[in-house]
Image (spheres, rainbow, N blue to C red):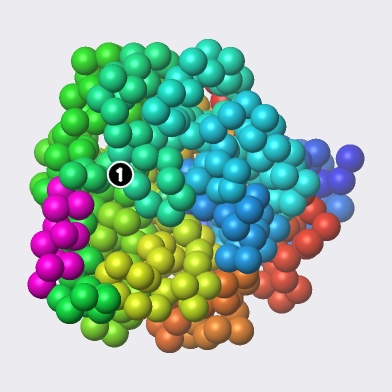
Amino acid sequence: MKRTLIHNATIINEGQRKQGSLVIADGRIAEILTDGRPLSAPCDETIDATGCCLLPGVIDDHVHFRDPGLTHKADIFSESRAAAAGGVTSIMDMPNTNPPTVTLEALEQKQALLAEKCVVNHSCYFGATNDNYTLFPRLDRTRVCGIKLFMGSSTGNMLVDRMDSLRRIFGGTDMLIAAHCEDQDIIRRNTEKYKAAYIEGADIPLNKHPYIRTVQACYASSRLAVQLATEAGARLHVMHVSTAKELPLFSNAPLDGTKQITAEACVAHLLFEMKDYKMLAACIKCNPAVKRQADRDALRRAVVEGQIDLIATDHAPHLLTEKTGGALRAASGMPMVQFSLVSMLQLADEGIFTPELVVEKMCHAPARLFRIEGRGFIREGYRADLVLVRPHTHWQLTRDKILSKCGWSPLEGRTFEWQVEKTFANGHLVYDHTTGVDDTYRGEELRFHA
Ligand SMILES: [Zn+2]
């Protein structure tokens, strides 16, 4: 059996930072050599990791790889390559594709596509509609990461807007319900108000997007979701929380397996704020909208304090040609999966997070929250999903570095201090900074403790 030694890294894992080495064998972490522990047997290959940090691979619980049906924007192969280059070793894909993943047949098709095309590990959500809750008991809970519920419409049309359906969804499953929360009536009223204020046929300016998809729209919907989940005793995960006002809805209890209501923040809402619309315009248009600086700063604090349980990307690529126009016409969503880890490590450099906290929120927390089997931590016997990142590199994000099919990023022009050097999925070197992605490799399907 081939043994690979990752030699002399700074291992950041479970709140600790230790100098040491690690042995990969048979796809797993075979030995962790810290605190002076010697190798048990010689290795066939040594990777010198001097100067690098070794982290568990990032698990991104929120990506839209647009496959099947929207593959002019992105596809599983192209976006999973971007993930690998970003140190992301596992992804959970969203169901608002064409066809949407709202039937057992579509779910089977999605799982087959992921197995065929995804170069990192993968799972996918089953999408709720107003009336498919009867299928929930037939889902394999060891293979499906959760149920995605749109309590606010976005790309695709999977809005669940009937109160009786919402009650049945929350009451009908003990699987995790991942919810997009924005109140549709509030958004509709605001849209009409702004439409009336602008000339017929002209679009509403882009910077009005957060005045249409308001704080109140987010709060009303998140509050309702929390209320319904609490009444039903359901497992609710509120995705992409974007406002300070929503934060008191969530507890800062640790993810110990009993926390029923959890919250996600996305990289865009942690990086951008209202003033950025001036420079980046539709490139940072997403749903829920990027809001005030005070909201961004409150989200950052909530990551530290624990009301936000994990950080994901909501990687949602569109072509640049689809990102033109104002608040009505420009598509919502942006690519983010390739640069999420380095962006969050950058916030650690700025003193907002620590590298240990970034690892907690991007690697450990998804594993805990979704009860993923054998991943998300650097532990002996766990799958060797690992990323080597080098600090103090100072590089600029230029378009030629982008692997996402859409070929642009809202972070273009920014400089980063951290660089992803190598990404291992199941012990396989799936990305190397010097040679690129191993396009022949395919990740494994995630498994969940029921
Ligand atoms: Zn999303």
Picture quadrant of residue 211: bottom left
Quick check: is 110 in the magenta stretch? no
Picture quadrant of residue 365: top left
Query: Picture coordinates of residue 172 (x, y %)?
Result: 40, 14
Looking at the image, residue 435 sits to the left or right of residue 86; the answer is right
Q: Quadrant of the N terminus?
A: top right
Query: Picture coordinates of residue 266 (x, y %)?
Result: 35, 54
Question: Toward the viewer: 239 or 397?
Answer: 239
Question: Toward the viewer: 432 or 248?
Answer: 248
Query: Picture coordinates of residue 434 (x, y %)?
Result: 71, 76
Q: Residue at x 52, y 72 (%)?
A: 319
User: Is residue 428 visible to us here?
Assistant: no
Vertical placement of residue 44 versus 370, above or below: below
Q: Which residue in the structure is indicated by mark 1? A: 152
Looking at the image, residue 177 sits to the left or right of residue 109; the answer is left
Q: Residue at x 47, y 59 (%)?
A: 316
User: Is residue 250 visible to us here?
Assistant: yes
Q: Residue at x 78, y 62 (%)?
A: 438
Question: Toward the viewer: 1 or 127?
Answer: 127
Picture quadrant of residue 411: bottom left
Mark 1 surroundings: few (<14), some (14-19) or many (≥20) residues within 10 A: many
Q: Magenta stretch: dominant SS?
A: helix
Which range is magenta?
186-197
Q: Residue at x 83, y 57 (%)?
A: 440
Vertical placement of residue 313 versus 308, above or below: below
Looking at the image, residue 285 sits to the left or right of residue 135; the answer is left
Outermost residue on the right side: it is 1
Query: Picture coordinates of residue 397 (x, y %)?
Result: 49, 82
Badge 1 element: loop
The amino acid marked with disc number 1 is: Gly
Vertical placement of residue 73 versus 109, above or below: below
